[in-house]
Image: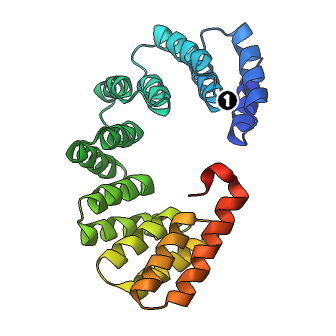
Amino acid sequence: MSSDDKIKGMMYASIGRYSEAVTIFNEVLDTSPDDVGVLMCRAGALSRMGSFAKALESIEKALELDPLRADAWFLKGLLFYQRGNLIKALGYLEQALDIDPRHAEAWCISGNCYYYIGDFQKAMDCYEATINIEREYPKAWYNKGVVLSDIRLYNEALQCYDEALRINPGVAVVWTNKGYCMAMLNKYEEALDCLDRALDINPEDVTALNNKAATLRRLGRDEEAAEYDEKVRELMIARGPHTVM
């Protein structure tokens, strides 16, 4: 097995063919069992397949071989974050940051952990650390905007959403959240413009559809609002009985 096989496995993983990627990584590891990079790649692919235990086993093997590998600690933290074990995730992410304080992804995922725990100030600190390291990081700007919106600092949230959209204007949820902030500031026409942008990207964005209906009602356009209510209802029915409210 050569480095070409590792690259081939990574290519399969990048297009979602995780099972094939794992097969290739296993073959590489048969001849090079101490290849930390391949162990990490295999862990990532296994995680995507939902094989948490096998992914964890692979990443722990990588850490045995190289305990100062920040990316390996980050990946272990990410595994626990994806499983919803936020406290453990934070511990492993802290290990990554002790080794590499400029690991932007570790700061960002730490921020997500603190957000879901309910510690908004620490979440904000983590997102700001991410941005200080890598300013062109749209998820960090978006997540910071979410925190600011949650604490009703809508103008400040809008600044963050604008930064996220400057970097990547093609993400519907950012437009949806920007529209929400505009509506909360009583800027209803601007809110509708944002929600239309979201729906151009994803016509089945239920949150955007609901928010557009609510905004239209604020403007007294009840008949138009009812049309969007009906679109939401149709989508909910199409997605199955358990999603109908």
Q: Tell me which corner region of the image, top left, top right, bottom left or bottom right, holds residue 153.
A: bottom left
Q: Is 39 placed above or below 163 here?
A: above
Residue 134 location, x and y as percent? 37, 50
Q: Which residue is mark 1?
A: 49
Farthest left residue in view: 121
Residue sitting nearer the eye, 95 or 174: 174
Count of all numbered marks drawn on residues in the image: 1
Residue 161 appears in the picture as rendered: yes
From the viewer's perspective, is residue 222 above or below residue 232?
below
Please provide percent x and percent y for residue 174: 46, 65
Left or right: residue 147 versus residue 214 is left
- Res. 171 in view: no
State whether residue 234 is above or below residue 114: below
Residue at left offset 30%, top offset 62%: 149
Q: Is 84 on the left-hand or right-hand side of 50?
A: left
Name the residue type under label 1: Met
Q: Secondary structure at mark 1?
A: loop
Instruction: Classify mark 1: residues with Cα within 10 Å, few (<14), some (14-19) or many (20+).
Output: some
* Quadrant into which the C terminus falls: bottom right
Query: Which residue is drawn at the image coordinates 49% and 29% (left, top)?
Result: 83
> Which residue is depicted at the point 42% across and 74% down?
179
Q: Residue 76 versus residue 182: which sits nearer the camera?
A: 182
Residue at (36% x, 78% y) in the render: 183
Tell me the quarter of the image containing the N terminus. Answer: top right
Percent coordinates x, y for residue 204 in the rendering: 64, 66
Rendered image quadrant of residue 34:
top right
Q: Nearer the viewer, residue 218 or 29?
A: 218
Residue 220: quadrant of the picture: bottom left
